[in-house]
Structure formats: structure tokens, C-alpha cells
Amino acid sequence: MTPQARPNLGGLFDGSTPADRVSGIAGRLGPRLITAPVGPANESPNPAQPAVESSPDVQHSKAADPMSWIDPIRVLELYFGLLQAALDANRQFVMGVAGVVVSRGSNLRSGLGSIRTRH
Amino acid sequence: MRRVVAIANGKGGVGKTTLTAGLAGQVAAAGFRVLVVDTDPQGNLGRDLGYGSGDGSSLGLAITHGLPVDVIRGVRDRLDVVPGGPSLWDVAPAFTSRGARGQTLPGLRPALERVRPDGADADYDLVLIDTPPGEPILQDLVFASSDYLIIPTRSDEASLDGLVVVAQRFAAARAVNPDLTLLGVALFGVRAGSTRLITRVRSALQETLGGAAPVFSTSIRYLESAAVDMRSRGLLPHELAQIHREDKSQRLSRLRQGVKVDTSEALLSRDSSAAGLAGDYADLAREVLGSITSRDEALRVEVAV
């Protein structure tokens, strides 16, 4: 919203300004069936002291604590995830090298075997 | 004694349904008995509170024919719901056609007055009514049945236009229900930490209201990720914060055991954001209850004098 001239709606809300329309249901509602409230009011919790409490986490979040933006568990998960990825990559690389060495070794052996047979 | 509070604005998308669900859940969690009434033909409240959507026919027939209304009991502890749905589109034509023939209809108030908490002698402490933005007859019915009105609004100009519409409707409703009182305006969906924006919008709203009602000092922050988490799981803000706390300890225990973390089911929101959002609702609920109490006391003093 920009600070420009605004309509003053206060009169409509406090009854000092009449509405420019009539309620769509005016004169169309039947009589009320029940008028008396049921149940003693003092059976309810006291609304004067509402028991809506903020949890400690909520109160903590109200403070401008930059640490609240860091999730230590997420950091740990990322660290272990990275470590696992590095180990997986290392394992794949070593297994690949081992595979090449084993297959070349086997080719070499079979090559030497065929030379020996010819001689 | 129950207090009936309507949540309304002439514009859609300003947070009426989300605010209704969040406030109801918070007040019920604090130990009060709460009834939520969904008068919106879109019936979106079911997504926020996590119950199956209905067609609203029971509420529609209660309004037009005085039949007993169906109540979904125990949606949360101490929280019951009268569901809305597409059948509520039929209410306005019924009023028009029967009104033209000079007939009267029962309306919403008698339907709700018959609803009582299951197994309790006492009444509901709070009845919250979610309203549709573009259905004048349904809004008029809600205003005729309510003690108080809360107007949620966003920080844009279009939301101010919605405020003008609801002000006209409010003034017209006072002819039918002179006790209807504006409890306050709640700023919804602002970025956390936008202090300057909040101050400016609050000042503009106060100027517009001309002292007729307060702008609540608590504004509800908007968090896309938390909104997605809550609607996809049918969670309320304080429940999402609780899930985050439980999720944190589960993830820590999985790390200790060396079990690989499956991120496909992970929450999109951050735990600190969810806790902040839950805090907003707790603060607003406290303000709303405090405001109702002080107005009730002022009324008692007025009557005594």
C-alpha cells in the first residue's frame, strides 16, 4: 500500500455512517429458534488469561538469532552424505582400475601362453 | 457463553481459510471448545484441517429448510467442524426465489445454535466462521449470525478494496444484527522481517479504520514451503512445528545408526520458519481472545451502568 488518500471506513464500522446498500437477507429470515445461551460461562477456561502459550522453540525463533537459520542436523547429514559420496566414488574408481589391471593381466598371461605354445 | 467470530474480506486469497484453521487449531489446543463453520462453496477448509471434503448440502439445507446440520466431530481435540462445499451455491437462489414469494428462511443462526459439543454439558467457547469472498448472501447470513468480525488482509491495494466491500456489507448487516462488532484487522501473508512494510501497511490500515477497531499487532508471515507442507499433510502451523521437532530427533537417531536418509518424504520448510509461523498464530490467538474478553467486559460495564 502506498501512503495516498484513503477512504475512511471508521463510520461504517462504528455505525455513524449508514450503509449504501441493504443486507441481502433483510426481512427474509425467520424467527430465531434459541435465544438463551446454554451452559454456565464459568465452565469455560478464562478467556481473560488465555492459555495460548508459545513453545520454547517459538520463543527462541522470535529472537534475531542467526544460529536459528543453521540446522546442525542438516549440516551433519550433508557432511556424512558428502563423505559417503566420496567413498562411493573412490570405491568405483579403485574397482575400475582393479578391473582394468585384472583384465590386462589375464590378456598378458594368455598372450604369453600362446607365444610359448608356438615355440 | 459462545462467541461467534466471522472471518471475512470482500476479496479472495487474503488468507481467510488459512487464518480460520490456524486460529481454531491454536485456540482448541489451548483448551477451549471450538466449532469451525465453512460457509465457502469451495470447501477448502478441509485441506487445511485435513478432513475429507464434503458437498456442503447439510449446511445448505439447514440454512434454507431448518434441517439439523451435520458436524464432523473430533477433527482435533475439542475441535469440531461444519463442512462447506458446492451445495452452498444453492443458498443464494433459494433466498432470491423464496424471498420473491414473501417467504422467510431459517438462516444460519438457528442451525448453529442447535450444534453442541459431543458429550459436554457446556457450550462451545468459540465458533469461527470462514466466509466466501464473492457470495453476498452467504456473507450477509454469516454477519447476521456473528458477534464479531475479523478481517484478514494482505499488504496490497487490492486487499484494501476488499476492505471497502466488507465495510459496506458490515454496515448493512448491522440493520439485521446490531450487536455485530469489528474485532480487528489481521495482516496476513507478509514476509518475515519486513518491518518497514508492516509498519507502513499497519499505519495505512489504522488510518482507513479511523479508530473503529484495532489492527492486530501480530501479523502472520507467509512461507510458501510451510504452506505446501501444511496443506499436503493437513497440518496446522503448531502441528508442523511439532512435526519438525520430532523429525529432528528422528534424523539425528538415523545419523547415529548410520542409516541412509531418504529425502523424498522430507519437509520442505525449515524448523525455525515453522516455529516462527506457529508463534505468529499463538500470538494472534492470544490477541483475539484478549480482545474478545475486553469487549465483553466493556459490554458488562455498559449494561451495569
Image (tube, helix red, strand yellow):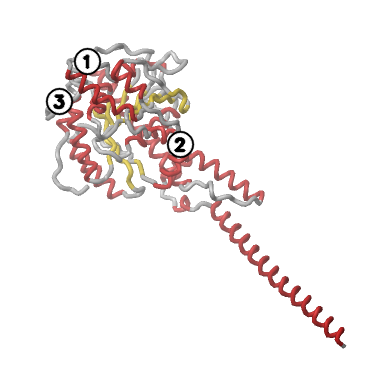
Q: Residues within 10 Å of mark 3 (few under 14, many from 20)?
A: some
Image position of A66 (left or right of B88): right
Query: Residue at label 3?
Result: A22
Specify the label residue B283 is tagged with: none
**Position of B138 relative to B253 (above/below):** above
Say what amino acid the circle numbered 1 marks: Thr
Specify the label residue B234 is tagged with: 2
Image position of B265 (left or right of A91): left
Q: Chain of mark 2?
A: B
Residue B91 drawn at (x, y percent): 27, 24
Image position of B25 (left or right of B162): right
Residue B84 drawn at (x, y percent): 36, 28
Q: Chain of mark 3?
A: A
Say what amino acid the circle numbered 2 marks: Gly
In this view, the mark in front (2 or 1):
1
Query: Residue at label 1?
Result: B104
Residue A106 drawn at (x, y percent): 78, 75
Residue B282 drawn at (x, y percent): 40, 35
Q: Using the rendered image, report if marks 2 and 3 lie on a common chain.
A: no
Element carrying mark 1: loop
How far is disc 3 from disc 1 in space, using C-alphas? 17 Å
Q: Quadrant of the C terminus of chain B?
A: top left
How far is disc 2 from disc 3 in space, using C-alphas? 39 Å
Say what amino acid the circle numbered 3 marks: Val
**Residue under the point 20% across and 40% down:** B161
